[in-house]
Image: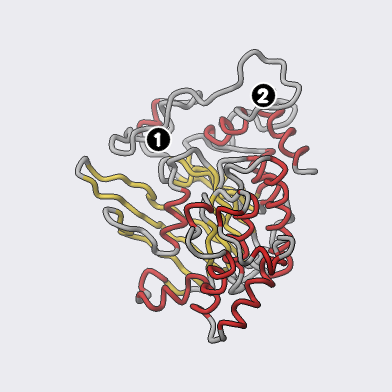
Amino acid sequence: MTNAVDAGDVGLLELRDLKTHFFTQDGTVRAVDGVTFEIRDGQTLGVVGESGCGKSITAMSVLRLIERPGRIIGGEVLLRGKNVLNYSDQEMRDVRGNQISMIFQEPMTSLNPVYTCGDQIAEAVELHEAISRREAWGRAIEMLAQVGIPEPARRAKQYPHQMSGGMRQRVMIAMALSTNPELLIADEPTTALDVTIQAQILELMKALRERNKMAIMLITHDLGVVAEMADEVVVMYSGKVFERADALTIFEQPHNPYTRGLLASIPRLGDKRERLEVIRGVVPNPLNLPTGCLFKRRCPYAMPVCDTPPPVRQVKAGHISRCWLTPESEPPSIGADAPPEVAEAAAQELTVAGR
């Protein structure tokens, strides 16, 4: 885990009570339901949670890429203090790529198969900068070299299918960074890559963050990636933020039972238990959400009061949790009195991260 950015740094992106709903024939899906968090300059924010919790829809909402039947129905997305939800289409086109770039989950579906990789990067540069085609092509080769692709001039003339998965992911990163964005949104950037390539991509992103002084919004379900990369962590569940704190606190002193469950379910080397820990049950149907706490049917600490929606509590400065458990009544913190499976999971993640 990297060192946290000073609290006094200028706010880059702030989400305030963001709501994105999908209006289907079967009912309304509250994919993002009141999400609030902030990303500061140079910070890496990890957004984690199970599949379907609203991580990617939150990112797509920031860039206003939500398509029907989805619609952003409330809240604010403040970029340098200005609400981009009020921007015109042309103003948003200027934001995308210039100030905010995004790496999508699967590069093979994001890259155009009938154009060379160099052409696609050069086109992105030409769309945002008044430069010639020759200069844009030169920038494409320069960016491919910057992300560690060997023989960039030759590789720029290749098509996506001629490259490996790791190389294609590097091409996507090169394209995203070709216009020097202030914020990079990385949506599952290491999914479907083998562990060696994953490590290379993460090291590349860290190096580019330092070199380009940019912020990163890292969307993932992999807590090992979060431990390696993030300054702060947002834990989402069923469209809501369930816990938010700096990365060290999330791994050492998680408050929310859902966060604890995620940590306890991490497999560990040398684990002699016959069965892995699991979070019982399944994610609730978004068309038929339970009343009260959305996690109550799966929570080992559920109480009668959980039939009422829980408040967002401040556990301590910079640490919030959506739960009826107070800091005084919460389960034991990770440490001497922690449940062994939770403490071991956190220790393993911190070891992997080199902390």
Q: Position of residue 165 (x, y in %)?
A: 61, 48
Which of the two residues, 205 or 2, is positioned nearer the viewer here? Answer: 205
Asked whether the residues under the numbered discs 2 and 1 touch, taking CB atoms below 8 Å apart as contact, a structural biologist would say no
- Determine which quarter of the picture holds residue 248: top right
| Residue under the image location 53 percent in, 61 percent down | 102
Mark 1 Cα within 10 Å, few/some/many (few <14, many 20+)?
many
Q: Position of residue 253 (x, y in %)?
A: 66, 38
| Residue under the image location 62 percent in, 53 percent down | 163
Which of the two residues, 41 or 333, is positioned nearer the viewer here? Answer: 41
Q: Nearer the viewer, mark 2 or mark 1?
A: 2
User: What SS does tag 2 mark?
Assistant: helix
The answer, for residue 8, to whether it is visible in the render is no
Q: Which label belongs to residue 293?
A: 1
Q: How many marks?
A: 2
Q: Which label belongs to residue 61?
A: none
Give above or below for 203 relative to 351: below
Side (left or right) of 37 relative to 209? left
**Image quadrant containing the C terminus:** top right
- Determine which quarter of the picture holds residue 19: bottom left
Which amino acid is tagged 2?
Glu
Q: Disc 2 marks which residue?
A: 341
Side (left or right) of 344 relative to 244? right
Which of the two residues, 156 or 226, is positioned nearer the viewer here? Answer: 156
Q: CA distance from mark 2 to mark 1?
A: 24 Å
Side (left or right) of 234 relative to 352? left
Q: Position of residue 158 (x, y in %)?
A: 60, 62
Which amino acid is tagged 1?
Cys
User: What SS does tag 1 mark?
Assistant: loop
The answer, for residue 96, to whether it is visible in the render is yes
| Residue under the image location 30 percent in, 59 percent down | 73
The first of marks 2 and 1 along the sequence is: 1
| Residue under the image location 47 percent in, 48 percent down | 55
